[in-house]
Amino acid sequence: MISALITVFHPTLQVADNVAAISRQVDAVYVCDNSPESNAGLFPGEKIRYVWFGENLGISRAYNRVLKDSAFGWK
C-alpha cells in the first residue's frame, strides 16, 4: 500500500485540488489539518483520510500523531 501524508494549515481550494490529484496516484492520503477550524468539506473522497487537530501542532508532531494512532491502521 502506498500512502501520502500531508499537513495543512488554513488550506485553500488549490491545496484541496492538489490533494485530490495526489489521491489519484496513491492508495490513501492522510491530511493532517493544523487549522483552528475544521476544513473537512474541502477533502471529500474515499481515499482521503482527514484528521483535524484544532490547533497548530507543526508538521512533525501532526505526522507522528497520525502515524502512531492505530485507528488509522498504523502501528
Image (cartoon, rainbow, N blue to C red):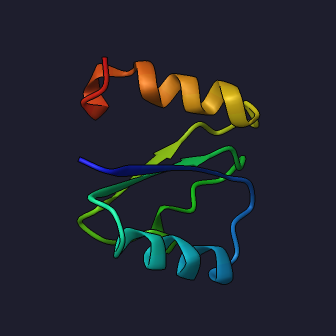
Locate residue 67 relative to residue 28 in the image: left or right. Answer: right
- Picture coordinates of residue 52, whole percent (x, y): 53, 44
Is the C terminus in the top left, top right, bottom left or bottom right quadrant?
Answer: top left
Locate residue 50 relative to residue 13 in the image: left or right. Answer: left
Of 29 and 56, the residue lying toward us = 29
Name the residue: 64% across, 82% down: 13
Name the residue: 70% across, 75% down: 12
Name the residue: 51% across, 73% down: 42
Name the residue: 30% across, 71% down: 45
Q: Quadrant of residue 53?
A: top right
Of 50 and 6, the residue lying toward us = 6
Locate residue 25 relative to residue 51 in the image: left or right. Answer: left
**Where 41 sits versus 50, above or below?**
below
Q: Quadrant of residue 23?
A: bottom left
**Where 28 sits versus 15, above or below?**
above
Q: Quadrant of residue 9?
A: bottom right
Locate residue 75 relative to residue 58 in the image: left or right. Answer: left
- Picture coordinates of residue 65, whole percent (x, y): 52, 24
Of 35 and 16, the residue lying toward us = 16
- Picture coordinates of residue 40, whole percent (x, y): 48, 61
- Picture coordinates of residue 63, whole percent (x, y): 57, 32
How many marks are shown on the rendered structure? 0
